[in-house]
Amino acid sequence: MLDQLMKLVEQHAGEAIVKNTAIPDKLNNAAMKEVASQILNGLQSQATGGNLQQIVSMFQNGGGNNIASNPVVANIISSVTKSLSAKFGVSPQAAQSIATSLLPTVMNQLVSKTNNPKDSSFDLSSILKTVSGNNGLDVGSLLGGNSNDTLGSLGNIASKLFGK
């Protein structure tokens, strides 16, 4: 999944990273890898923290213009900001600018690709299994059935998975 995330970041990092003078050209690839890694780490952190519902909700709601205000994405933006500042010597303001311009676009693309039946590069089942660390997770039964019960069921299952 990290390789797929890296491709998404590379596709959208033009203005935010590649053409940004705050990040030296020789560090562009490393910065893009860091962003992809922080996205995966952020999703994993949210899942293991018992926020599997918020992740599923983000995918089911389809992203959109307000994705940056989604708590999962907001946490990832914060992580990317801190990481770029610490690892690449980018000012906190420049790191925040990079994260807030790049992450919503990448996350919207991730959600869009996941919800597109004609695009097999990402699927919700694989994402949830990867971020939860539970390869035996039966995501189909989690998402199937009555959609009004799905989020409640996910909360119950997440509490069983993570002991919360």
Image (cartoon, rainbow, N blue to C red):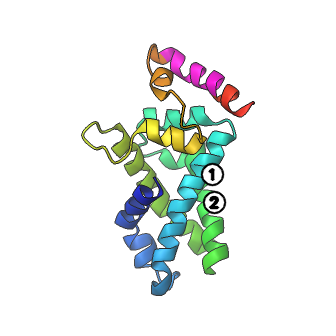
Q: Which residue appears farthest toward the front when viewing the image? A: 136
Q: Main secondary structure of the magenta part?
A: helix
Q: Is residue 67 left or right of residue 53?
A: left
Magenta segment range? Answer: 148-157
Instruction: Judge the density around disc 2: few (<14), some (14-19), many (≥20) Cα neighbours within 10 Å.
Output: some
According to the picture, the residue beneath numbered tag 2 turns out to be: 79
Identified at 38% across, 45% down, the residue is 122
The magenta stretch spans residue 156 = yes
Residue 39 occupies quadrant:
bottom right
Write down the residue under mark 1: 75
Q: Residue visible at 45% across and 52% down?
A: 1
Residue situated furthest top in the rendering: 146
Q: Which mark is residue 112?
A: none
Q: Please tell me whether residue 41 is drawn above or below residue 126 in the rendered image.
A: below
Point out residue 36 in the picture as x, y percentages from the top left corner: 50, 61
Quadrant housing the C terminus? top right
Residue 139 location (% of width, % of height): 49, 28
Q: Residues within 10 Å of mark 1 (few under 14, many from 20)?
A: some
Which x, y percent locates residue 100? 52, 61
